[in-house]
Image (cartoon, grey):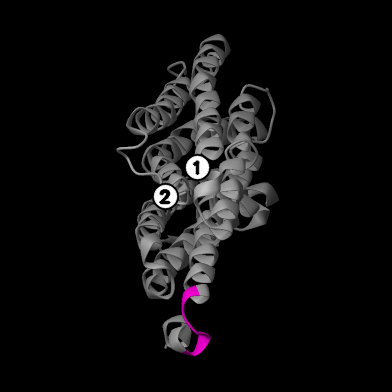
Amino acid sequence: MQLSESFLPMAGSVGMSSMIAYFFLIFAAYAFLGSFIFSWLGKSGIAPEHRTSRYFTAVIAAVAGISYMLIAHFYHEMLRELSQLTDPAKREELLRTSYNAIGQLRYIDWSITTPLLLLKTTSMLKIQPSQEKNNIFWLLFADLFMIITGYIGEQQLTADGHIMVGNKLIWGAVSTVGYLVVPYILFTFWKRYKDTVQPEERTAYKWLALSTVTTWGVYPIGYLLTIIDGFNLNYIHISFSIFDVINKVGAGVVVYLAAKKILEKRVPDDATMSTHMVD
């Protein structure tokens, strides 16, 4: 729909899958905005030792929210051009070539947010940097290695935007090395420190660590699906948007609930009730 110089996409002109992808891009941006606001408003209602994790959640939400606003903006501009094309081959070509251009913003987002997610995870076991200096270094290095090499793999394109499949698969394999290191180190931390923290912290750590071998696994699958001719890349936009919200907002909720329960065990309910209320 064209309103003066403004454009709002509609399924009739851009297709249903494009509209669903656009919906979830905007949805993710809103979810991260809400997470950022709640992180600041809710920081007084948790155990003091976990307030740093709330700051991590706020930064993660801010970076991801800005990223998704940019992604949604460029996707919107792509839909404007798509609505003006009638040739099915040209429409498919635009959707395919725009995916890598728009998707690279996610890698820039992940290079900041995933290390913070991992630091937030280790904070649930109250691991001091001086205790595990080497392992924390390699944990963050492996994560950044995974993101950067994956980004390079996504950029294995010809001048006209076609994927160089062989090169992309090689860089994907290299990136997988970093991906495998992350859960290994997290499991090492679990074995060493799980009995040194409270049950709520142990449960939160377990859920966050398990996410690296479950929900994080969606991203390499999406990476591989891009090389399949004719695959609708809007489905990857949709999946990545949903799982980014689960991994980032969901992680913040898990930590908040654990830290809130710890505080409630220490003081009477009526003493903490006011901190749980938001005017």
Is 34 on the left-hand or right-hand side of 215?
left
| Residue 250 in picture, x, y percent from top left | 56, 57
Residue sitting at x 40%, y 40%: 115
Numbered circle sitting on residue 126 = 2
| Residue 178 in picture, x, y percent from top left | 48, 23
**Closer to the camera, 184 or 169?**
184
**Closer to the camera, 234 or 42?**
42
Q: Is residue 43 above or below residue 276?
A: above
Tell me where the magenta segment starts and ends, as one range.
Answer: 266-270
Q: Secondary structure at mark 2?
A: loop
Q: Quadrant of the C terminus?
A: bottom left
**Closer to the camera, 265 or 53?**
265
Q: How many marks?
A: 2
Q: Secondary structure at mark 1?
A: helix
Q: Is residue 36 above or below residue 103?
A: below
Mark 1–mark 2 contact, CB under 8 Å?
yes
Residue sitting at x 44%, y 87%: 271
Q: Earlier in the sequence, mark 1 or mark 2?
A: 2
Is 135 on the left-hand or right-hand side of 161?
left
Numbered circle sitting on residue 102 = none
| Residue that label 1 marks | 193
- Mark 2 Cα-neighbour bin, 10 Å: few <14, some 14–19, many ≥20: some
Q: In the image, what residue type sits under mark 2?
A: Lys
Residue sitting at x 52%, y 27%: 179
| Residue 174 in picture, x, y percent from top left | 50, 15
- Mark 1 Cα-neighbour bin, 10 Å: few <14, some 14–19, many ≥20: some
Residue sitting at x 54%, y 39%: 190
Q: Is residue 43 above or below residue 188?
A: below
Residue that lies at the very extreme toward the front in this rendered image: 196
Residue 8 seen in render: no
Q: In the image, what residue type sits under mark 1?
A: Tyr
